[in-house]
Every structure is written in structure tokens, then in C-alpha cells.
Amino acid sequence: MNNLFDESVPLVKAANLDVRLGQKHTFGGMTTTLVRAYADENNVVVGYSFGGSDELSSAKHMLPKARLVDTTGRDFTVVDSRGAVRNDGGSLSMKRTQVDAVTIFEACEKLTVSGEHGFHLMVELLTSSSESTAPEAEAPMETCGGPFDFDFKIPVWPITVLEVGREQQAKGLSLSLERVESSPAKTRAFIRFMPPDIERSWIPIVKTAFFKQGRLADTPMTETRCASFSFQESLHGKPGKYSLTVTEIVGFSPDRPEKDKRIHGPWRFRFEIPIS
């Protein structure tokens, strides 16, 4: 578990900002442990594990599932979740399967920086014994353990906001890189433009030095919010000059895919993270 958490948010480990919790719940022969957690104004990261059930040994596919709310009733969106299966014990007959998981949540509105903030986590493990070679998301899944509930309090750390305000034009369309928000957990760029129409959902395709193939932004552009794009690696505490290129914007038509539309750029932006 610790390795998975540190691989998911290595800068959190480097700054020693997470809290070791070690909360355990056992039900139906399965023990779930809330191991570690971290929070900042934008993100909450939780690491947890499942173990102790013989059903895990026969499962072909396992999918950890988590939901997070806080004491104010604020709900959080899962933006990344990863798991790892490992076997503990000596001989094969004595080995016990354990599932480790790390989930990164995004706050729908910024959290307030504080020394202590209350959260409520609900986790369960979905499993399948299907022999199908179909992707796990298409295999029939059922709850193997849980839901398990955890209440915990941890500090909320501040993020760094870099106001960029750069604007570029191409193909008659103006895009602006409004700001970059960074924390040890994640760095996000916020891109604003006027959607060419309201019938489609318009999402930028972004290329950076960390991900040269280009990939869709995390969220589309709406009338009230910028499109956001998460860097592959957090840039927190890494001063220097960086670049971001929007290669095109794609308009997705939810009911008629043949009506999807692409507007090619590129729109190139540069920004600098100062020495703190």
C-alpha cells in the first residue's frame, strides 16, 4: 500500500504531508484498512486496502470503489483510482490475497485551508469470477466486501495559484491560459475560450513535455467554468519555464457522433513557475 500511495503522489511523500491513519473495519471475514490520507484545497487522496477474505483468491477481476463526502455535505469527484493485488504469506497454500487501492478525489469547490477538516469515506470491493476476456468495466461485477465507512480528520494544505492570463489565436478562435494551480498532489491548467456552439461539448486536446501524444482535458469548456487539464506530474516546488500546447478542440455531439467537430490549432502557451 505505501508503495502505491507514494507512486501516485510522490511529492506528498517527499514533503511528508500525508497522515497515517490505520483505521480498520472487519465484516464478513474481510478487513478493510484506511491507511493514509492527504488533502489540499483542490484534492483529497486516500490509500486503503482489503484483505482476509477467501473470495479474493478466486476472483478474476477486482475493482475498488470509493465515495467521499465531508462534514459540510460537500461531495467529491473521483479523478483517478488505481489498485494493486498482492499475495502475503509463505507457501502457496497459505498465501492470502490483498488488494491495495489509492483514489484521488477532486473538490467541487475549494476547501478552506485548516489544521483539521472532517471527511467521511465509503469504500467497497467489486469482484468478478468471469473467465471473459472483455475489459473489466464490461464484466459483471458484484460487491465482495463492504461498503465500509470511515470518519477521519486531516489538515487541508494550501495550493499555489499562478495567474497566467496569456491569450493565443488560431483559426479565428481565441484561447487563453488563465491560471495554473499546483499542489504536491496535482498541477492543473485552466483554459478558457468561447465555445463555437452550445450543441456540442467542447474539450481541448493538450500536449505537454510530459505527454507529447496529446490527450483530452479533464473537463470541457462551459459558459461558467474553464476547461481544466491535469499534468502527468505535479510541478509543485519545481521552478522553471514550461509549455502547454492545445493542438485542437473537439466538439462532441452526445446524441449524434457523426456531428462531432474538430477545430485545429495550435494554440501555444508558456508559463514560468518562480522560485518560492
Image: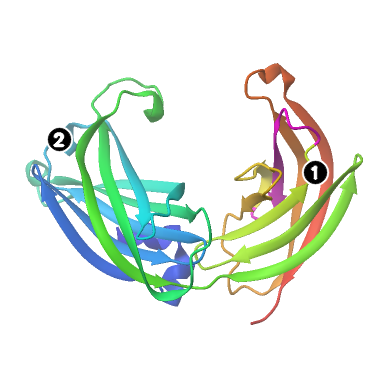
169 inside magenta stretch: no
Report helix, strand or loop for mark 2: helix
Report helix, strand or loop for mark 1: loop
**Residue occupying the point 28% across, 47% down:** 123
Residue 155 lies, with reference to residue 147, above or below; the image says below
Q: Which of 102 and 176 is in front in this view?
A: 176
206 inside magenta stretch: yes
On the rendered image, what quadrant is the N terminus found in? bottom left
Model colouring = rainbow
Give the mark nearer the N terminus: 1 vs 2.
2
Left or right: where does residue 218 sit relative to residue 141? Answer: right
Res 270 visible: yes
Amino acid type, residue under disc 1 in the picture: Met
Estimate the x, y position of residue 30 in percent, counting from the top left: 13, 45
Estimate the x, y position of residue 38 in percent, counting from the top left: 39, 66
**Residue occupying the point 49% across, 56% down:** 107
Q: Nearer the viewer, residue 152 or 26?
A: 152
Estimate the x, y position of residue 272 in percent, counting from the top left: 74, 70
Q: Residue 55 carries which label?
A: 2
Q: Which class describes the residues within 10 Å of circle 2: few (<14), some (14-19), or many (20+)? A: some
Q: Which mark is residue 237?
A: none
Residue interval drawn in magenta: 196-210
Estimate the x, y position of residue 190 in percent, counting from the top left: 68, 55
Left or right: where does residue 251 sit relative to residue 59? Answer: right
Disc 1 and disc 2: Cα gap in Å? 52 Å
Q: Which class describes the residues within 10 Å of circle 1: few (<14), some (14-19), or many (20+)? A: some
Q: Residue 194 carries which label?
A: 1
Res 18 visible: no
